[in-house]
Image (cartoon, rainbow, N blue to C red):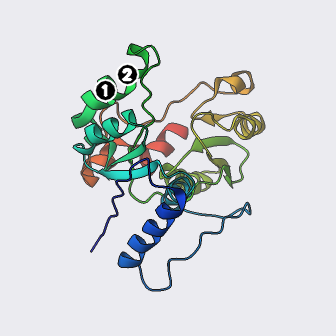
């Protein structure tokens, strides 16, 4: 059974009491011996997206008693905005970000506009988060060259990196050597890695215009359909590029 922890903490709770309450709550739902004092390190570690999110939330909640997590449906958005008005720092979780549309009035009118409309008198420190796009099967993201190549650069991120690697394998059978870049972030992009690869291969999919003058062929765009991301797996596959379509565009 999936169990979720919901922390509703007032601003008067100090950090020591918050740590005690948090450990006691975790001990009720986690195996014995698995709750210990958190030790952080600056050493590089490979982790999944989910592990990175959990680690960031854990660090922030441990460091600041005003940060707490709420979820997971749209009904919590209004409660979270009200808590932010009173000085707390809520993180409101949506199962998928499509559900945010059900809370768009709170997100836009109650949260996003309040600081501007009050001339800075009302601060709304809040985060709304949830997965979007093709979320199933997302693995680690490293900001690195996943596959060396010399004929074309394929730049991608998240789940689509796996598709790009499969497409590169198919292309190799056609005599095309594709270099695959796994992006660290979308905004800002890793321009140094992207441009260095584009200037080596002289062809790019998912173009950054900074390297336009190095290209030897017209720009090709491979992207998902211009529709909201479907929830059903069969419709999701129709909405995002697949290996066959990617190879048809690049061959």
Residue that sits furthest to the bottom in the current view: 32
Q: In which quadrant is the N terminus drawn?
A: bottom left
Residue under pointer 1: 110
Crowd tier of the residue under label 1, counting other residues whose Cα lies within 10 Å: few below 14, some 14–19, many 20 or above: some
Marks 2 and 1 sit apart, C-alpha to C-alpha, by 6 Å
- On screen, 24 above or below 127? below
Query: Residue beneath label 2, please?
Result: 114
Between 179 and 192, the residue placed more toward the observer is 192
Coordinates of residue 223 in the picture (x, y in percent): 44, 35
Front residue of 76/219: it is: 76
Name the one closer to the observer, 17 or 50. 17
Residue 148 visible (yes or no)? yes
- Pointers 2 and 1 in contact (CB under 8 A)? yes
Instruction: Report if residue 176 is visible in the image.
Output: no
On screen, residue 188 above or below 71? above
Please give left or right for residue 81 compared with residue 156 in the image.
left
SS for dot 1: helix
The residue at the point 34 percent across, 54 percent down is 8
Quarter of image, res 194: top right
Label 2, residues with CA under 10 Å away: few <14, some 14-19, many ≥20? some
Which numbered marker is on residue 36? none
Q: Name the residue: 25% across, 35% down.
A: 103
Q: Quadrant of residue 83?
A: top left
Image coordinates of residue 138 in percent, x first then y, are 46, 57
Which residue is at a point 65% across and 51% down the rendered structure image? 175
Q: How many marks?
A: 2
């Amino acid at each position: 059974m999936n169990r979720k922890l919901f922390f509703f903490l007032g601003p008067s709770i100090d950090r020591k009491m918050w740590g005690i309450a948090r450990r006691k709550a975790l001990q009720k739902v986690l195996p014995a011996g698995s709750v210990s004092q958190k030790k952080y390190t600056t050493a590089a570690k490979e982790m999944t997206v989910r592990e990175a999110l959990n680690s960031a939330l854990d660090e922030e909640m441990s460091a600041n008693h005003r940060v707490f997590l709420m979820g997971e449906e749209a009904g919590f958005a209004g409660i979270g905005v009200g808590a932010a008005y009173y000085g707390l720092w809520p993180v409101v979780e949506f199962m998928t970000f499509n559900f945010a549309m059900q809370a768009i009035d709170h997100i836009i009118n109650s949260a996003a506009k309040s600081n501007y409309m009050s001339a800075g008198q009302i601060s709304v420190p809040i985060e709304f988060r949830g997965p979007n796009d093709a979320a199933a099967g997302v693995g680690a993201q490293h900001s690195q060259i996943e596959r060396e190549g010399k004929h074309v650069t394929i730049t991608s991120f998240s789940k689509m990196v796996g598709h790009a690697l499969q497409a590169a394998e198919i292309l190799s059978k056609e005599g095309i050597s594709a270099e695959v870049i796994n992006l660290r972030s979308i905004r800002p992009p890793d321009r140094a890695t992207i441009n260095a690869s584009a200037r080596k291969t002289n062809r790019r999919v998912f173009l950054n215009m900074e390297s336009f003058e190095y290209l030897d062929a017209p720009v090709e765009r491979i992207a998902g359909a211009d529709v909201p991301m479907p929830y059903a797996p069969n419709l999701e596959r129709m909405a995002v590029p697949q290996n066959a379509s990617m190879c048809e565009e690049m061959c």
